[in-house]
């Protein structure tokens, strides 16, 4: 398998380099040179394949020998460890629950798979790999859980003190082993700055092997394509056209859906569902992509003003607006509308949906007003208990916290407090690794 950068389609790297480096030097994003069409025997008989089988078939076709079959099997077995059930709301709407992993959000799929791939490619290296992650909450939890106890890899998480929720903080600070949490006396941007400076610091890079668990790593995207097939498999009535409604921020999930379609999955349309951070829906209606500073909303994991996967989507559509528009329809919603959507889903279907999923619901409903003859699948990207106060407030009901989150409340937090000076961070890294 070879990958190119979206900024230079004539220079290729191996899967190993793309996964370990994360980002090409030219500031593009890595894309697979070939997106293979999967065999008809597979596409037509999905029901005969388990979720793990689906992951294996996709990787085998995509990696083209970059990793031996038996190793792919191990990687899949260790990363696809929880289900993605499809829950039907009514005849034409279902919800794909992607929150059954350790951090209760879909990011667990990408984080676990990336951990497995990185550790696989790192095996031959003598020096351990130190992965730096700045987090505003969610990503850190998924990465911590995904890399927990991964041999040869240490994780350093930087989070802004007092600015993540209580349970999010526990997800970062209670694991121990190879996971260390640095509690930074500053903002998320300060955390991100420290990480960026560390990557640019020559002394540091001579001494230790640094990498990032960035969300644009291709290893996070690949497993996200698996669950589109897994969803399709579970649809009972396949006579209608299938559309996916995808609550989006950086558009990783939607890009993974496009990959699934290129691999042969029979998807009629993708719906880009956003909150008021609507640069992609605007691009779809106006033809101009204008990044803007993000605005804080109820569905805060989608508060993105310059979606990082936009260039991957452009690349897939050959940089033409028309093809973009043919496959993706966009809608955006305010917080007031999102709350109304959450209440409606609860009242009509007795289903507690989180604010991100609610945006997906509203977009699907809007789409189906005009396109009546389709079967819609909403990606439910997080468990409602991750946004407990908001959800309970809006729905006036009690949400049960899943056991794996609830038990964190009693665990002891361990963090290292640090100021925003780069030298403090650098010295700490140098003396600990
Ligand atoms: C990250 C995240 C999103 C946005 O996903 P993208 O792939 O960045 O578009 C949506 N919902 C939740 C709960 C998330 O954590």
Image (cartoon, rainbow, N blue to C red):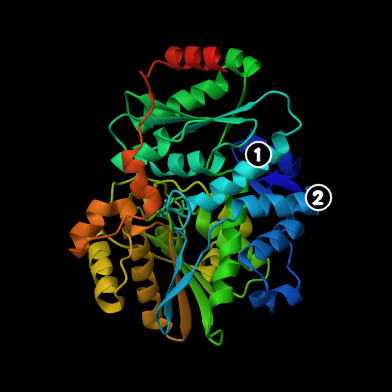
Residue 98 position in % (x across, y down): 47, 60
At x 61%, y 48%, the residue is: 113
Residue 376 position in % (x across, y down): 45, 76
Depth check: 81 or 294 in front?
81
At x 78%, y 48%, the residue is: 67
Judge the density around disc 1: few (<14), some (14-19), many (≥20) Cα neighbours within 10 Å. many
Mark 2 CB near ligand 1 (8 Å cut): no
Depth check: 423 or 49 in front?
49
At x 73%, y 52%, the residue is: 72
Judge the density around disc 2: few (<14), some (14-19), many (≥20) Cα neighbours within 10 Å. few
Q: Is residue 299 visible?
A: no
Work out how far the residue at label 1 is from the one at label 2, CA to CA, in angstroms: 15 Å
For the C terminus, the image quarter is: top right
Depth check: 370 or 291 in front?
370
At x 38%, y 31%, the residue is: 159
Q: Which mark is residue 185?
A: none
Question: Quick check: 71 above or below 24?
Answer: below
Corner quadrant of residue 230:
bottom right
Q: Is residue 353 visible?
A: yes
Residue 389 position in % (x across, y down): 23, 52
On screen, residue 127 versus residue 235, left or right, reads right
Q: Which residue is mark 1?
A: 118
- Tag 1's secondary structure? helix
Residue 345 position in % (x across, y down): 29, 72
Corner quadrant of residue 391:
bottom left
Badge count: 2
Q: Earlier in the sequence, mark 1 or mark 2?
A: 2
Decide: marks 1, 2 in contact (CB < 8 A)?
Answer: no
Q: Which residue is mark 2?
A: 68
On screen, residue 269 versus residue 396, left or right, reads right
């Amino acid at each position: 398998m070879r990958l190119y950068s979206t900024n230079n389609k004539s220079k290729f790297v191996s899967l190993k380099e793309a996964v370990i480096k994360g980002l090409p030097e030219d500031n593009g994003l890595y894309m697979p040179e070939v997106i293979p069409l999967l065999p008809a025997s597979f596409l037509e008989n999905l029901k005969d394949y388990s979720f793990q089988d689906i992951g294996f078939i996709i990787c085998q076709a995509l990696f083209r020998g970059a990793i031996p079959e038996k190793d792919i099997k191990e990687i899949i077995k260790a990363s696809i460890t929880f289900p993605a059930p499809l829950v039907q709301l009514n005849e034409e709407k279902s919800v794909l629950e992607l929150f059954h992993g350790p951090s209760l959000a879909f990011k667990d799929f990408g984080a676990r798979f990336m951990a497995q791939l990185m550790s696989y490619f790192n095996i031959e290296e003598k020096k351990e790999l130190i992965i730096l992650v700045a987090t505003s909450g969610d990503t850190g939890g998924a990465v911590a859980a995904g890399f927990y106890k991964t041999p040869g890899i240490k994780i350093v998480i930087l989070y802004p003190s007092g600015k993540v929720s209580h349970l999010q903080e526990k997800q970062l600070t209670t694991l121990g082993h190879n996971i260390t949490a640095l509690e930074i006396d500053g903002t998320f941007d300060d955390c991100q700055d420290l990480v960026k400076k560390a990557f640019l610091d020559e002394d540091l890079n001579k001494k230790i092997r640094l990498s990032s668990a960035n969300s644009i790593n291709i290893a996070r995207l690949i497993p996200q394509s698996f669950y589109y097939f897994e969803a399709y498999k579970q649809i009972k009535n396949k006579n209608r056209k299938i559309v996916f409604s995808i609550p989006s921020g950086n558009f990783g999930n939607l890009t993974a859906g496009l990959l699934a379609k290129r691999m042969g999955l029979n998807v009629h349309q993708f719906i880009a569902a956003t909150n008021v951070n609507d640069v992609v829906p605007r691009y779809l209606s106006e033809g101009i992509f204008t990044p803007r500073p993000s605005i804080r909303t109820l569905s805060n994991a989608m508060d993105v003003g310059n979606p990082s996967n936009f260039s991957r989507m452009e690349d897939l559509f050959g940089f033409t607006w028309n093809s973009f528009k043919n496959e993706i329809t966009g809608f955006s919603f305010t917080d007031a509308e999102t709350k109304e959507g959450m209440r409606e889903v609860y009242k009509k279907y007795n289903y507690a949906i989180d604010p991100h999923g609610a945006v997906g619901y509203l977009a699907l409903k809007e789409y189906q007003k005009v396109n009546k003859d389709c079967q819609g699948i909403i990606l439910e990207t997080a468990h409602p208990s991750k946004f407990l106060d908001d959800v309970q407030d809006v729905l006036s009901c009690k949400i049960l916290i899943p056991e794996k989150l609830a038990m964190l409340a009693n665990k002891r937090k361990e963090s290292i407090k640090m100021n925003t000076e780069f030298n403090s961070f650098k010295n700490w890294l140098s003396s600990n690794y």
